[in-house]
Amino acid sequence: MQDKKIVTQIGSLPFSDVEQAIEYSLRCGIPFLPELFPRGESMLNLIKMPGNLSCLERFKQAADGLGLVKVQCIGPASLIFAKYDRDKAIQNINNHVSKIMDGLNAKKVILFLDEPSLDQFDGDYNELWDPIFKNFDVIRGVHTCGEANWDKMLASNIEIVSFDASLYDITSGFGYMMARGAGKRIAWGIKKADDVKDFQKGDLVTPPCGLGKEPVDSCEATLENLKRIARDVSGQLE
């Protein structure tokens, strides 16, 4: 049987209506916490207001009792690149994620730390991410839409590596083989089926990035494309 828990998205949507965003999210195999940016916020601004998210309370209602959902928060490497002190960055993220998790009663939660500036950080990834993930009962994931040290990311203490597979191929090299052998899962950020190089059981498909800057009309096409590709790649596992 095909695994329907494959399709999810990164978070940001171009809608202006919360109910529309929630309805769209619930149509994914793994519903995700939407965020609506037309009112002018950015990820950097949101971290200054822990829990002040446009769809959070409605998402908690919709997610009550669901088997698996996905939430996200800006990651510490990106905050450090934005001139945050390391400890302050981690503290702010922990506060923000605490607000997200409080009252979220899905049976399992994937938490993605969103790290678009990961290529700007040369230090130990685990020293950044472990102080956050250790505080929450979540499936650990990190998403980057940009470049990264892929071997370090694949070797880190996370369960899901989410990346822009429409631009990067991380499947070559010993680090990838080792990570896959150890059970590392991939969230393939795709535009077309050929972007998925090595789909394995437990992997996900997503857009390469959030859709917040895309035309509203493109969201439906994106979702249908993801569902179609998910059917194809999961069928190959049978």
Image (tube, grey):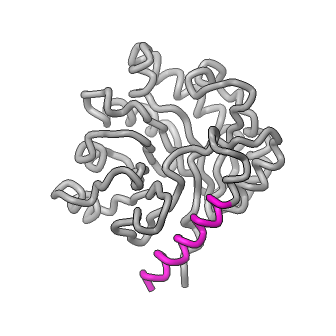
- Which residue is most to the left? 174
Question: Is there any visible trace of residue 137 in the rendered image?
Answer: no
- The residue under the point 39% across, 55% down is 165
- The residue under the point 41% across, 49% down is 163
Q: Tell how many labels.
A: 0
Q: In which image quadrant can residue 122 be found?
A: top left
Instruction: Return the x and y of residue 209 as percentages of the image width and height.
Output: 52, 45
Q: Nearer the viewer, residue 179 or 171?
A: 171
Q: Nearer the viewer, residue 108 or 114?
A: 114
Instruction: Return the x and y of residue 191 as percentages of the image width and height.
Output: 50, 58
- Quadrant where the N terminus sits is bottom right
Question: Is there any visible trace of residue 232 in the rendered image?
Answer: yes
Q: Nearer the viewer, residue 120 or 103?
A: 120
Give, as a single range, the part of the protein colored magenta.
Answer: 221-238
Q: In which image quadrant can residue 6 be found?
A: bottom right
- Quadrant where the C terminus sits is bottom left
Determine the main secondary structure of the stretch shown in magenta: helix
Q: Nearer the viewer, residue 10 or 222?
A: 222
